[in-house]
Amino acid sequence: MNITQHILIVEDNAIILELLDTLFTGEGYSVTAVADGDEAKAALEYERPDIILTDIVMPTVDGFGVLNAVRSHPELAHIPVIMLSAKSRTEEIRFAMNQGADDYVTKPFEAEKLLEAVRIRIQRCKEKRRWMRWYLDNINYYLTRTIPHEIFTPISQITVAMDILQRDFYVMQREDMAELYNLVLSATDRLVHISSNFSMYASIQNEIENVHRDKPIQYSAPFNAAALVEKTVQMCAEKFQRTSDYVCVADESVWLTLFFPYFEKLVAELCRNAFTYSMPGTMVWITAGLDKTRSKYILSISNQGRGLNAAQVAILREQFTVFVQFDREYYEQQGTGLGLAFVKSVAKLYKGTFSITSSPGIGTTVWVGFPLTSDIFVTMESENTMTDNINNDSTTTTVHNTHIHQQTDSR
């Protein structure tokens, strides 16, 4: 069943307003046509259009006043707004888009191009709302099922282990005690990881909000990026008992001033995912260094895991990915889905980039890039003034298990 789309048109020129009314009515739209911004704001008190088409220069409240009223109202903020104006200079168009407009059409306009712009914006809005509904359903699922499971499972393991120790301590074999000890240690580590993810994610979200309030963000004393990457990857590989399954190549000449705990956590979460979603005996590749233009620091991590389909990759590229995990009902896996959301937040905070490619049955590659601005990058010439934040050796490239590496080359 086709649902009539509702458009609000705001235009102070009576001839143009009538023309637009006729054009969109003829295309099957339900139209509310008003002559200025005040009338538009009044109409929005009781109407929820699918899209708003507004002139910019109008008496009393202009087009930007309408746009601001829409974007600042929680029930209206999702509605796409197209600006319609005779102003056609690049800086004027860019200003409108920066203010929150979804599109900008210049006068005189071609009817078909305007209709197409409206159709595209309505369709994109529908797709975004479908995504948000899926995302909210996903959050509800994780808050009611996954999160309690992730917390109570290790608590139960610790409780059972302590009950056994209390009951059988004096008659237990040393090997049995060691097994219970390792169980408690593993469960505790799982709880610490969950708590750390929530704490770090909340911290970085607060920093992102501070950027909008023009407050400074955190940086660290310069540290050698290669040393941090190599040490973090090694620790992660040891935890997963995969020390023969990775190759790490890192550029030792790069020193960063990103907030050290954020960058360390970013590397750890990407490595954790790479090992979690691939089988022992398959390779994980980590590269870290400058891009070809020497304008970005790029961290890349690839695995030979089960991979993701195109729809799943598209979801992970969305802005909101907290608590997102895939195929949990088919695969045994731990975690809350906060790790990748944290990685994307670090990239956002420091004006970096996040990219992911994946193919089912082949593997996944994630890239995180940071611009080499004076805020986050220090040249080697300044090395003698730096304090390295981690124990570092002189190794720049680490290659583990020559046999597996040779197998990889022969594939």
Image (spheres, helix red, strand yellow):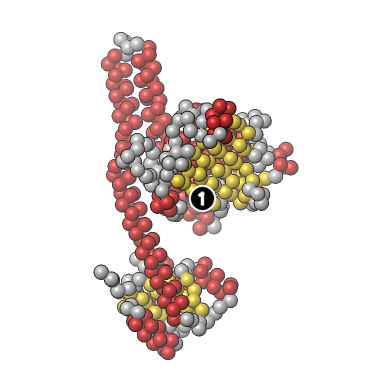
Label 1's element?
strand
User: Seen in the image, is 2 located left or right of residue 209?
Assistant: left
Residue sitting at 47 percent across and 71 percent down?
Answer: 103
Residue sitting at 65 percent across and 34 percent down?
Answer: 396
Q: Is 307 located above or below residue 137 in the figure?
A: above
Q: Most extreme residue toward the bottom, as rendered?
A: 15
Q: Nearer the viewer, residue 250 or 26?
A: 26
Residue sitting at 40 percent across and 32 percent down?
Answer: 190
Q: How many marks?
A: 1
Q: Nearer the viewer, residue 254 or 243?
A: 243
**Quarter of the rendering containing residue 392:** top right
Q: Nearer the viewer, residue 325 or 371?
A: 325
Q: Most extreme residue toward the front, as rendered?
A: 410
Q: Is 62 located above or below residue 363 in the figure?
A: below
- Visible in this render: residue 70? no
Q: Most extreme residue toward the left, as rendered?
A: 1
Residue sitting at 50 percent across and 83 percent down?
Answer: 108
Image coordinates for residue 316, horizontal then vertical, percent? 43, 50
- Visible in this render: residue 305? yes
Image coordinates for residue 341, horizontal then vertical, percent? 45, 47
Image quadrant occupied by the N terminus: bottom left
Q: Residues within 10 Å of mark 1 (few under 14, many from 20)?
A: some
Image coordinates for residue 357, horizontal then vertical, percent? 49, 48
**Quarter of the rendering containing residue 120:** bottom left
**Quarter of the rendering containing residue 399:** top right
Q: Is 212 located above or below residue 405 in the figure?
A: below
Tell me the kind of residue under disc 1.
Answer: Ser
The residue identified by callout 1 is 355
User: Seen in the image, is 6 located left or right of residue 228?
Assistant: left
Image coordinates for residue 363, horizontal then vertical, percent? 47, 41
Q: Is 52 located above or below residue 293 in the figure?
A: below
